[in-house]
Amino acid sequence: MLTYDLEQRGDNTIYEYLYRCIKLDILDGTLTAGSKLPSKRKFAKHHQVSLKTIENAYEQLLTEGYIYSEEKRGYFVSPLETDTGVRQARHQNHIPFSVCGSKAPSPAPLLPASDSKSSAFFADFTSNQTATEKFPYDTWAKLLRGILSEGNRSLLEKLPFEGLYELRVSIAKYLYGFRGMQVSPDQIVVGAGTEYLCGQLISLLGRDLIYALEDPGYRKTAQIYRTNGASYEYIRVDENGLCPDLLRESPASVVHVSPGHHFPTGSIMPVARRQALLEWAEESAGRYIIEDDYDSEFRFSRRPIPAIQSLRHNHRVIYMNTFSKTLTPAIQIGYMVLPNKLAERYLSAMSRYSCTASTLEQHALAAFMDNGYFERHIHRMKKYYKAKRDCMLDVLEQSRLYPYVTIDEKDAGSHFLMHLHTPLSDTELKWLARENGVRLDCLSEYYAEDKAQRAHTIIVNYSGLEEADFRKALDVLLLAV
Amino acid sequence: MLTYDLEQRGDNTIYEYLYRCIKLDILDGTLTAGSKLPSKRKFAKHHQVSLKTIENAYEQLLTEGYIYSEEKRGYFVSPLETDTGVRQARHQNHIPFSVCGSKAPSPAPLLPASDSKSSAFFADFTSNQTATEKFPYDTWAKLLRGILSEGNRSLLEKLPFEGLYELRVSIAKYLYGFRGMQVSPDQIVVGAGTEYLCGQLISLLGRDLIYALEDPGYRKTAQIYRTNGASYEYIRVDENGLCPDLLRESPASVVHVSPGHHFPTGSIMPVARRQALLEWAEESAGRYIIEDDYDSEFRFSRRPIPAIQSLRHNHRVIYMNTFSKTLTPAIQIGYMVLPNKLAERYLSAMSRYSCTASTLEQHALAAFMDNGYFERHIHRMKKYYKAKRDCMLDVLEQSRLYPYVTIDEKDAGSHFLMHLHTPLSDTELKWLARENGVRLDCLSEYYAEDKAQRAHTIIVNYSGLEEADFRKALDVLLLAV
């Protein structure tokens, strides 16, 4: 008769222990396929344990398929692939690989995680991270705590796929007030960031289409299209943004543009060109304009630029924006505004899906907007970025590098372009900077074509840069001139 | 000279008002392309406003492209498409479509949202919604409030794409304790739900592959593959789960299975078949098993079933699960465990992407798990679902329908199968139920092939059903026998 030493069971219940012992005997071949297990009654008597204990152990083995039963004949070992390695491991470590019941083992033998590399740069011009120190954390936390204290259990229910209705109303009001857009909350879809939403949009419009992307432009935009299996073509961007004539010559039927504040050139698309894009969209069925309004809020002076979506004939315009740039990257809430017909099609197709953005944070964001905190925050950030930019330009003017640079900046956003009069190629320039602790990207890297003509222009994202580090970094760049 | 009545400007600043008036005059053709605007100085004097005011208005029009400037000649109207509709609208409503400065108009003329339809069903057998009333809301809220009160500004920083490290450690410990899986936090990727993660996985593994899906199976799984542009084939599921022999005959290189608790049949895959799947994966390079462990936690008796990922040769297994089923659908946090090589490839490709799950909720979830609340909650839910199931089966036994049904249930999850002895087809059955206020799905609908043989079996999701409604619904079904 099978015999197991119950004294060895440690913290395990008897049923668990017996289940594991038999399982290991099956896996290492001690109990061979087809061999009969003792009857439950005899086995219980033999070990002086209750019949129920044995029943539980056998039942578990049965459910997992280690044994099978035949009516009136008893329990038999299933034919399985066996492993002598199990036997060795078992000798070294009583129960090497196991599932515990209600108690987690302590300490858990986790496999170690690798260390993250520490940064070797004292100045990073490439990070366009939002400056989170200006975010009104206390206000945000107070709103969240307030929502939690209301004890509203609707916080636990599944939201509609398109997001919290209250938030969509707040967004519609904001868009009316600040972007000249007259849209219904029904047209708005909220999700966990624009990277996610852009993927959804590609699914909705189709992977068989050709998408037109800006050249130069955000490299991540192209990555999103690639990751989502969509084909794209680059269309040249001149000082007024994407060229509609070149778009018309391409086979693309959807164009992804950032008319409000183009990255990295910083250009703003004039209204005539916006109209030309709308005309292009009207010329053929199924054409769309994706208006990526990322980073358009931070214009330092005067009024915000109206969105393409606010112009006439906007039924081919899909507007996108995110709060992770304006608030903090920790709040992964983005949204898009779809033309009515597209919104209907999308929502009926996705009705069984879940909204990816946090329910709690959607409630908090609606309150944040409705109470005017969002508006005030944008205002504060504009002043902050403007002061930061002014400070950086001052540092530059006072530096020995100043005679060798030309600045191109558009009174907006959190970066400017710095053309450097240097004999080095961009690759050499980057290498020299990196060797001396400065991380930078050149404008030429953002061009798919025509890289050479755009050489020697550094993109300076200053939102995360310290004044002293910038000064030091400019000294490094002196080595290049 | 252009003249505008400044008395009409309402709440607007003079600069905003003049900007809008000129813009509307351009758009409706009153000011024609190429016509010259008054000089800033003369225009300011004429309206008795400061030069700065006019400069701001002109500058805004210039930035948006409505006018252009020529050196030493002045400002001219750009050639644009004009619209007589603007003129009409303007007469009806002083400034019909406009962008405001720092003040949002009140009330905002939002386009109305459509009403959502109210449900016509008194009993819905199709909803497998998590019963949120058992969720320990107070504990959850307390944890969140505690995290917020710590004032830890790291809550505002961007998380790594793969999610909060502390949460990944908590998940690794849980998987070790309850699923027999020995994994490193480095292998775990956290994201906003499994629908999102599954899409990511398709991008990672490739859209050119063929994926094998269970027949029958969750319809949403197929929808996710379709939405993400991936090809799939159905593989028959018998009483032990997906058939490896049929899989071997198919051209699929990745199989998506739910061995822990198959929907809708409720079957648990025996270990021999799990081994057979692992063997299949070993036979050819690039093969993977996606182990979808959704809903596997709610086994009413005995031990949890170990995951395929916990078996030997698990380097071709991708494990997936979500907290939105175990906790509440409002917490959109799912995760996947990738084999080491795949994890490295994925994380290096996606390093610039953002983590889609809420930072705050990831912190709270880590604390929830580390303090044993998660384990206790699962335990409580198992008892709750078991009691609910027992209650439903009692109602059924006492009903007049009982002689006409056969129940198939696997002591787990939150649904059972009810075979009805009826002469009606499934379509007629559904129609009859719907006409009488009962919403139901039949097992046959979950089959891609062989629907007819599975007729007359109703899927009863009981987690959201009230006892009295269920009793009434059974009376409705009496009409079918």
Image (cartoon, coloured by chain):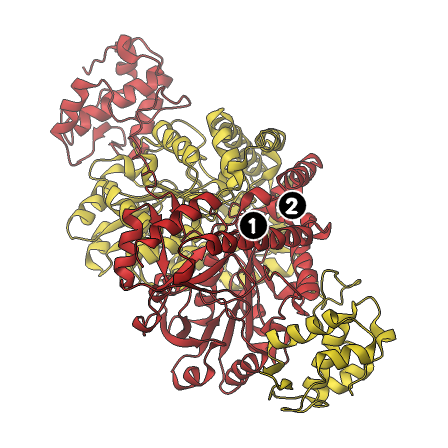
Chain colours: A yellow, B red
Task: Count neighbours of disc 1 (C-alpha within 10 A) and say few if under 14, some if 14 to 19, many if 20 or more.
Answer: many
Choose between B364 and A35: the one closer to the eye.
A35
Q: Quadrant of the C terminus of chain A?
A: bottom right
Q: Is residue A46 above or below residue A369?
A: below
Task: Count neighbours of disc 2 (C-alpha within 10 A) and say few if under 14, some if 14 to 19, many if 20 or more.
Answer: many
Residue A413 visible: yes
Protein chain holding label 2:
B
Choose between A363 and A451: the one closer to the eye.
A363
Instruction: Give the label on residue B118, or none.
Output: none
Name the residue rendered at 28%, 30% in the picture: B111
Name the residue rendered at 29%, 62% in the picture: B426
Protein chain holding label 1:
A
Q: Quadrant of the N terminus of chain A?
A: bottom right
Instruction: Give the label on residue A125, or none.
Output: 1
Mark toward the viewer: 2 or 1: 2
- Which residue type does callout 2 highlight? Ala
Q: Give residue A410's position: percent from left, percent from top.
A: 42, 38
Q: Is residue B14 left or right of residue B132?
A: left
Q: Which residue is mark 2?
A: B364
Choose between B62 and B7: the one closer to the eye.
B7
Q: Give residue A247's position: percent from left, percent from top.
A: 23, 55
Q: Give residue A299's position: percent from left, percent from top.
A: 43, 33
Q: Give residue A100's position: percent from left, percent from top.
A: 72, 66
Q: How many marks?
A: 2
